[in-house]
C-alpha cells in the first residue's frame, strides 16, 4: 500500500506532466489518406495525457480541397497551405517550435523518415518528442528516435 508521501509525489508528478505544452504538427499528405483513415480526434485525446495542446497545425499542399480545409478547421487544426514542399514547410515550423520556450513537447504526426533530423535536434535541445504514426509505411527510424510513439487508430 503506497504511503501518503508516495501518493502526493505521484499526484505532483502527474500535475507537472500535464502542465507541459505540446506543439502538434501533422504531415497532411502523408497521413490524411483513404488507405490510412486516421481518427484525428483520437490523436488529440491520446496527446492530452502528456500535456496541453497549444499548437495544432495541419500541413496541406495547394491541391487540398476547400472541404478538407474546412474539416480540419472544424476539428481544431490550423490548416497551413503551402505551394512548395509540405515537408520543408513543416520542418521549418517544427524547428521554430523547438526554439519556442513555451513548448516543452514536439509532437509530429507523420510516417516520413525525413523528419528524423528534426526529432534528433529537438531532443538535443531538451524537448521531449512524440511521433504519431500510422500503418502502412510508418518509419522504423522515426519510431526508434522519438521519446514516445503513439499509433493512430483508424475510424
Image (tube, grey):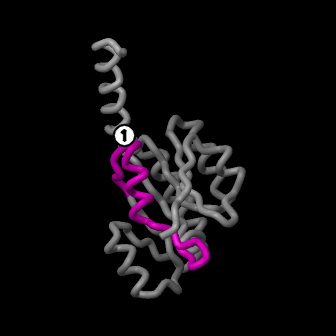
Residue 27 vs residue 154, the one in the foreground: 154
Q: Is residue 38 covered in magenta?
A: yes
Name the quadrant of the N terminus.
Answer: top left
Left/right of residue 2 with respect to residue 144 in the rendered view:
left
| Residue under the point 44% across and 71% down | 80
Residue 24: % across, % down: 44, 56
Give the image location of residue 3, x and y in percent.
32, 12
- Residue 129 belongs to the span the image colors magenta: no
* Point 39% across, 64% down: residue: 41
Choose top left, top right, bottom left or bottom right for residue 27.
bottom right
Determine whether the residue tagged by mark 1 lies in a helix, strand or loop.
loop
Write down the region rendered in magenta: 32-55
Where is 121 relative to 9, above or below? Answer: below
Q: Residue at x 58, y 58 (%)?
A: 133
Point out residue 118 in the picture as x, y percentages from the top left corner: 60, 50
Position of residue 55 measured from the top left corner of the image (x, y, whole percent):
37, 56
- Note whether 152 is above or below 123 in the view shown: below
Q: Which residue is label 1 attached to?
A: 20
Q: Nearer the viewer, residue 16 or 8?
A: 8
Amino acid at each position: 500500500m503506497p504511503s501518503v508521501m508516495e501518493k502526493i509525489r505521484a499526484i505532483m508528478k502527474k500535475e507537472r506532466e500535464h502542465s507541459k505544452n505540446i506543439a502538434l504538427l501533422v504531415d497532411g499528405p502523408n497521413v490524411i489518406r483513404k488507405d490510412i483513415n486516421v481518427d484525428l480526434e483520437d490523436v488529440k485525446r491520446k496527446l492530452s495525457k502528456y500535456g496541453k495542446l497549444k499548437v495544432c497545425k495541419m500541413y496541406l499542399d495547394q491541391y487540398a480541397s476547400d472541404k478538407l480545409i474546412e474539416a480540419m478547421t472544424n476539428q481544431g487544426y490550423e490548416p497551413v497551405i503551402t505551394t512548395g514542399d509540405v515537408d520543408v514547410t513543416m520542418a521549418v515550423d517544427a524547428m521554430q517550435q523547438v526554439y519556442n520556450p513555451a513548448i516543452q513537447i514536439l509532437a509530429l504526426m507523420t510516417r516520413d523518415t525525413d523528419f528524423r533530423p528534426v526529432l534528433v535536434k529537438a531532443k538535443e535541445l531538451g524537448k521531449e518528442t512524440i511521433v504519431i504514426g500510422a500503418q502502412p509505411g510508418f518509419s522504423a527510424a522515426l519510431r526508434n528516435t522519438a521519446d514516445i510513439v503513439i499509433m493512430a487508430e483508424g475510424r
